[in-house]
Each structure stands twice: as C-alpha cells, then as structure tokens.
Amino acid sequence: MHLIVILAFLGIVASLGSALVYLMQDRGTTNRTVNALTVRVGLSIALFLFVLFAHYMGWLQSSGFAQR
C-alpha cells in the first residue's frame, strides 16, 4: 500500500513539473499547462479517495501521532 501511495505522489509531482515546463515553453499559447494541472488535480483527488478507502478497509493504519 505504501508503494502505491508513493508512486501516486510521484505522479502528482511529475505532473506539476510538466505543467511548469509547459508554462515556460508555451507562454500561454496552448492548453498543455491546463491539461497537466487537470491531471494533477485528478491524481490528487484519486489519491485522497484511495487513502480514505484503504484506511476504511484496514489496509493502512493510523499511527496515532496527532492524538493526545
């Protein structure tokens, strides 16, 4: 499970990086930046929902770090 979360996070960071590259190269003349950011948002939402589902199924356990 941790590997899936790490790979999804790396995909999010890669999508953000590609959006930056497209922004610098295209200077706003194409929609590639918007598409890359849309992919990033979609991956972020999917990762969040996956973490919630994995916690519900018991695949991921909370550490209790923030509890008093």
Image: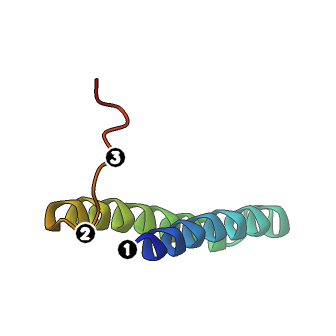
Q: Amino acid at mark 3?
A: Ser
- In the rendered image, residue 30, in percent from the top left (x then y), is placed at 68, 72
Q: Residues within 10 Å of mark 2 (few under 14, many from 20)?
A: few
Q: Nearer the viewer, residue 57 or 33?
A: 57
Q: Is residue 2 above or below residue 63?
A: below
Which residue is found at the position 79% from the left and 69% from the top?
Answer: 26
- In the rendered image, residue 7, in percent from the top left (x then y), is placed at 53, 75
Contact (Cβ within 8 Å) of mark 2 with mark 1: yes
Location of mark 1 (residue): 1
Which residue is found at the position 27% from the left and 57% from the top?
Answer: 61
Residue lying furthest top: 68
Q: State the separation of the CA atoms marked 3 and 1.
A: 15 Å
Location of mark 3 (residue): 63
Earlier residue among tags 3 and 1: 1
Q: State the separation of the CA atoms marked 2 and 3.
A: 13 Å
Q: Image quadrant of residue 51?
A: bottom left
Q: Residues within 10 Å of mark 1 (few under 14, many from 20)?
A: few
Q: Is residue 4 visible?
A: yes
Location of mark 2 (residue): 59
Q: Amino acid at mark 2?
A: Trp
Query: In terms of secondary structure, where does tag 1 sit?
Result: loop
Q: Image quadrant of residue 68?
A: top left
